[in-house]
Amino acid sequence: GENVEQHPSTLSVQEGDSAVIKCTYSDSASNYFPWYKQELGKRPQLIIDIRSNVGEKKDQRIAVTLNKTAKHFSLHITETQPEDSAVYFCAASKTGTASKLTFGTGTRLQVTL
Amino acid sequence: KAGVTQTPRYLIKTRGQQVTLSCSPISGHRSVSWYQQTPGQGLQFLFEYFSETQRNKGNFPGRFSGRQFSNSRSEMNVSTLELGDSALYLCASSLPWEGYGYTFGSGTRLTVV
């Protein structure tokens, strides 16, 4: 089955700096890669996703890049703010019937003032 | 529009008992998936239902079961509870045949004592 590795497990950046979280996946058939943000005591919230027919996607301060050949994808957050502090999870899946998300182990991002 | 609703939010049960958790998906979403979240194992897929049928199942023992009703609401049942079943149980809904854009509920925090 699919296996997703995520690094780093913790990341501390100063406000205004950029943060990068990296994930690798094992199943070359995976074609959908979402990123979720989970604040303490709250539900995971989808912040951005990318499909395998696209190499990069951007939404304001957040961007995701995908390298299908190397089977890795990354989340980039620019101009970080204290409210970006949370745990971020990457995931991979094969869309269509019987799809399921395989998650990475999470990255705890702390943005300091 | 209303999000994914999970009830109850918190539950304390004794080892050996059984428990039933409920999930109402976003209106129009017919696919419901369940995930277990623990500090040690992260987010793990339990099963997915569509049109009252289980389409996919994760690697959990048979004590974990579920069902889906004709209105797409889903229930998850855990029998003969063990201490290790203490976790946050998350339900996610998405449009069928796509597997994109999973939206999570706030979860049910189950504590087994």
Image (cartoon, coloured by chain):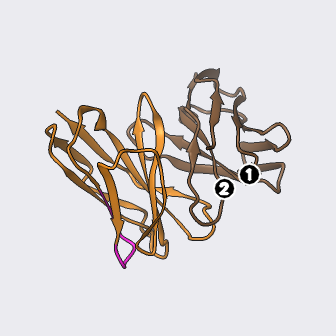
Chain colours: A brown, B orange
Which residue lies under the disc numbered 1?
Answer: A29
Reply above or below: B85 against A15: below
Residue drawn 66% across and 32% down? A80
Query: Residue extending furthest bottom?
Result: B70
Instruction: Name the residue type under label 1.
Output: Ala
Between A94 and B95, the one lying in front of the other is A94
Check residue B14 for magenta coloring.
no
Where is residue B61 shown, x and y percent of the image?
Answer: 36, 45
For the record, the magenta segment spans B69-76
Q: Are marks 2 and 1 in contact (CB under 8 Å)?
A: yes
Residue drawn 60% across and 66% down? A97
Indicate the quadrant where residue A99 lies.
bottom right
Q: Secondary structure at mark 2?
A: loop
Q: Secondary structure at mark 1?
A: loop
Report, in whole angstroms, how far the alpha carbon at label 2 lies from the one at label 1.
7 Å
Instruction: Name the residue type under label 2.
Output: Lys
Indicate the quadrant where residue B34 lies.
bottom left
Mark toward the start of the polypeptide (2 vs 1): 1
Q: Left or right: where does residue B110 sit relative to residue A56?
A: left
Residue drawn 47% across and 42% down? B44
Check residue B71 for magenta coloring.
yes
Q: Residue under mark 1: which chain is it in?
A: A
Where is residue B22 shown, x and y percent of the image?
Answer: 29, 60
Q: Left or right: where does residue B94 sit relative to residue B105?
A: right
Q: Left or right: where does residue B65 sit relative to residue B2?
A: left
Label placed on residue A94: 2
